[in-house]
Image (cartoon, rainbow, N blue to C red):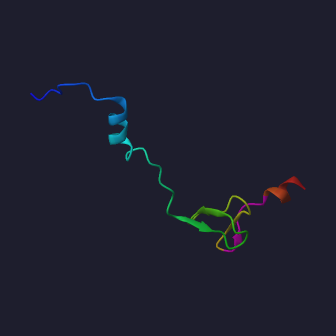
């Protein structure tokens, strides 16, 4: 059975693992046609409450009034 002859240093171990921990940006972000906020595609915009040009949820400013 293969056993390492010496301990692998912390920096060497972390260099090997560095590519695993990279964060990726979501690829499906789109701009809302109403307000211009970025949100996930095929979902109601949290900022204005519109989906496909129709108001689905009342906006936060209107709810506060």
Closer to us: 47 or 64? 47
Q: Where is residue 12 shown, x and y percent of the image?
A: 33, 35
In the rendering, at what x and y percent does residue 19 appear?
38, 47
Q: Residue furthest right?
A: 65
Is 22 placed left or right of 17 in the picture? right
Q: Residue at x 36, y 30 (%)?
A: 10
Q: Quadrant of residue 14?
A: top left
Is 25 drawn above or below residue 52 in the view shown?
Answer: above
Q: Position of residue 43 (x, y in %)?
A: 59, 62
Look at 77% across and 60% down and name the residue there: 58
Q: Splitting the image into 4 quarters, where does residue 33 fall?
A: bottom right
Range drawn in magenta: 53-59
Q: Where's the N terminus, which quadrant?
A: top left
Q: Nearer the viewer, residue 65 or 41?
A: 41
Judge left or right: residue 28 versus residue 48: left
**Left or right: where does residue 57 sit relative to residue 41?**
right
Could you tell me residue 5's position as x and y percent? 17, 25
Whether residue 2 is in magenta: the answer is no
Indicate whether residue 57 is drawn in magenta: yes
The residue positioned 51% from the left and 64% from the top of the image is 28
């Amino acid at each position: 059975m293969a056993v390492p002859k010496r301990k692998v240093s912390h920096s060497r171990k972390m260099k090997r693992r560095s590519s695993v921990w990279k964060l990726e940006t979501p690829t499906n972000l789109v701009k809302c046609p109403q307000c211009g906020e970025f949100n996930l595609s095929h979902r109601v915009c949290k900022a204005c409450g519109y989906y496909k040009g129709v108001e689905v949820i009342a906006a936060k400013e209107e709810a506060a009034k």
